[in-house]
Amino acid sequence: MKIDWDRRTCARKGHVTYAPDDPRLRVRLRAETAHGEVWRCLRCGDFVLGAPHGSGPASDAPLVPRGKVLRDLFILRFLAIERAVRGVFIVLVALAVWKFSNSQDSVRRLFDEYLDVFRPVFRHFHYDLDHSPVVGTIQKTFGYKHSTLVLVAALLLAYALIELVEAVGLWYAKRWAEYLTVVATAAFLPLEIYELTEHISWLKIATLVLNVLAVLYIALAKRLFGLRGGRRAFDEERHSASLLEVEESAGVPARTA
């Protein structure tokens, strides 16, 4: 089923109407009804009862996201939410590492006590905890220096900050955030691929696929790094939309350069 992004957005945020100074356009955007004047929405094209939200030259009509632009915005905000969730999770992990670094001895003693309690239970099910990879990894962390753990916590916080900055920028569709997302995400792709060679999991595969698609989509759709005409083509596309918005809604043929 095809999504009508224009009407979907108008249903959530309301219509956007505009009264151009040009009489030819004005008469095509406005109509009279038994209930009063109505103006055509610049986003969905439906007529809306009441005075217009703005007026002036047609070239100054507001740039109202519609169609493909709304779809792109929806995808960017989905990526923003994913970045925000990941950033918060990494912050929690960094805090856990920092707290552990300040109480390694007590945590080690507590872990050894629980290990002694559960060792006979697991032995009953023919599982040797002393040779468990998980237990071995945890015991290995007890040998890390306090300074090393603090450094790990600091790096995790820095990574989380990048994720959260990306999330805010993508939510508001900022071009600098799109560049940051592509560069930062692409930089970690080799590490994600290396982790898959060490241990394969569906979560790692899904994360890698999502990040690859995000890099390709943002770089191509937003014309980053000179792709598909670069920034000039991107600006011309948006500028043309703002100039033609009123004419398209009014049904007037577009002017050509």
Image (cartoon, rainbow, N blue to C red):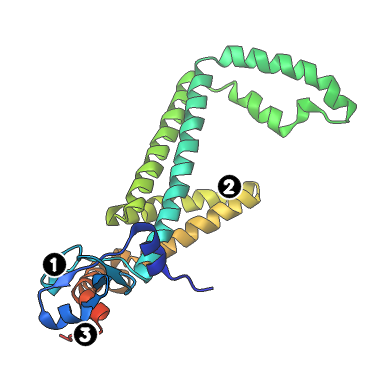
Count numbered badges in the picture. Answer: 3
In the displayed structure, does residue 5 sit left or right of residue 21?
right
Q: Which residue is mark 1?
A: 55
Residue at (33%, 69%) from the top-left corner? Answer: 66
Which one is in front in this view, the residue at disc 2 or the one at disc 1? 1
List x then y, in percent, for residue 184: 39, 50
Give the percent coordinates (x, y) of residue 59: 14, 72
Mark 3, Cα crowd under 10 Å, few <14 / some 14-19 / many 20+, is few
Residue at numbered disc 2: 195
- Labels 3 and 2 touching (C-beta < 8 A): no
Name the side, left or right, on which 236 lies relative to 111: left
> At label 3, which amino acid type do we have?
Ala
In the displayed structure image, the side of residue 7 where residue 20 appears, left or right: left
Residue drawn at 50 percent across, 20 percent down: 99
The amino acid type, in three-letter code, at marker 2 is: Glu
Query: Which secondary structure lies at badge 3?
Result: loop
Say which label, 1 or 3, has the lower sequence index: 1
Q: Which one is earlier in the sequence, the residue at label 3 or at label 2?
A: 2
Earlier-in-chain disc, 2 versus 1:
1
Label 3: which residue?
Answer: 254
Measured from the top left, where is residue 123 in percent x and y?
Answer: 86, 25
Residue 155 shows which numbered tag?
none
Which quarter of the rendered picture does the N terminus lie within?
A: bottom right
60 or 166, which is in the foreground?
A: 60
Of residues 173 and 109, the one drawn nearer to the viewer in this rendering:
173
| Separation of marks 2 and 1 at Cα, in angstroms | 57 Å
Do the numbered discs 2 and 1 sit on residues whose CB atoms are within 8 Å? no
Q: Which secondary structure lies at badge 2?
A: helix
